[in-house]
Amino acid sequence: MRARSTLFTLYSELVFPQDTVWVGRLVEWMELLGFSEPAVRAAVSRSAARGWILPQRRGRYAYYKLSPRVFWQVQQVRRRLGDKACRQWDGRWRLLVYAVPEGMRSQRDKFRNELVMLGYGTPAPGIWLSPCAEQQATRELISFYQLEPYVELFSAERVGDEPPQRLVNKAFKLAEAKVRYRQLQRRIGSLPANPSAEEAFAQLIQLIHEARKILFFDPGLPPQLAPPGFDGAATLSRFSEARERLRLAAGKLVNASS
């Protein structure tokens, strides 16, 4: 776990739905994860320099607030980790088509990376699809990158009797997703039965950290589209149970205001 990425996990799991936390609390949390105070403060400074978090003063105390952009990303990650919409899939695909000028390549590349975060995959250049990406979030992403003139967004049904598995395999990195899910299953299976508060805290953050990386490989496939042996939905159900169990065991350590 890298320090800056761990900061995102802490804000996502322990600070949300608030967006601001005392820097001393960040230091305390990350020391429980094995980071030294100088390493934490360096990671906070670098994140602030990039505009990911915004410094605030409250008397003698320093606080850090997530930028609106990163707060939006936290919302999407949390929604997707807990989203059960795809388990009741309506059979319609979210389809996005774009033709972005070469002069906007940097915006286009960043846009594509965040489409993956929302659950889109690409079976062909310029075409992105998802069985259940949240369309309001998609529109917000298009607006952020000012790509409205170049992007069309549809909801459509697939025509034909051929199983959609070939399309799914082409659009999404399911082999990597399977590997990640197996790793998450092993971590869940190895959790201690009666951890101390400190152990539960560390296990919780490591669990969240590992689970959110899967979102870049699995769009949240509904049962109708999942290939044989692909148990993403079942694993995420086990993850949710383990997450709540660890939060209870960690007690006050997961409280940003304690």
Image (cartoon, rainbow, N blue to C red):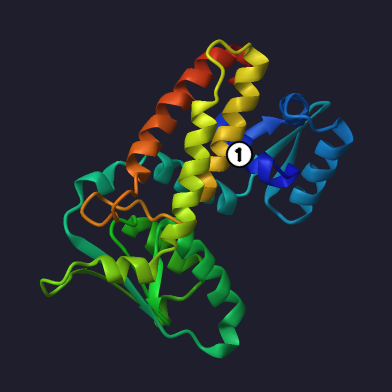
The amino acid type found where label 1 is placed reads: Thr
Q: Residue at x 60, y 26 (%)?
A: 203
Q: Quadrant of residue 8?
A: top right
Q: Quadrant of residue 56?
A: top right
The correct choice, above or below, for 147 with respect to 79 in the image is below
Q: Residue at x 78, y 27 (%)?
A: 31
Quadrant of the rendering where the N terminus is positioned = top right
- Is residue 225 left or right of 111 when viewed as pictured? left
The correct choice, above or below, for 192 with respect to 33 in the image is above
Q: Residue at x 72, y 46 (%)?
A: 4
Residue 249 visible (yes or no): yes
Residue pointed to by mark 1: 9
Percent position of residue 100, x then y: 48, 84
Residue 16 visible (yes or no): no
Percent position of residue 242, x then y: 46, 25
Observer-nearest of 224 and 82? 224
Percent position of residue 223, x then y: 24, 49
- Is residue 181 left or right of 8 when viewed as pictured? left
Quadrant of the rendering where the C terminus is positioned = top right
Q: Quadrant of residue 226?
A: bottom left
Q: Point out the residue furthest to the right here.
A: 38
Q: Point out the residue furthest to the bottom here.
A: 102
Label 1 sits on a secondary structure element that is: helix
Observer-nearest of 190 and 76? 190
- Is residue 162 left or right of 31 when viewed as pictured? left
- Is residue 166 left or right of 139 when viewed as pictured? left
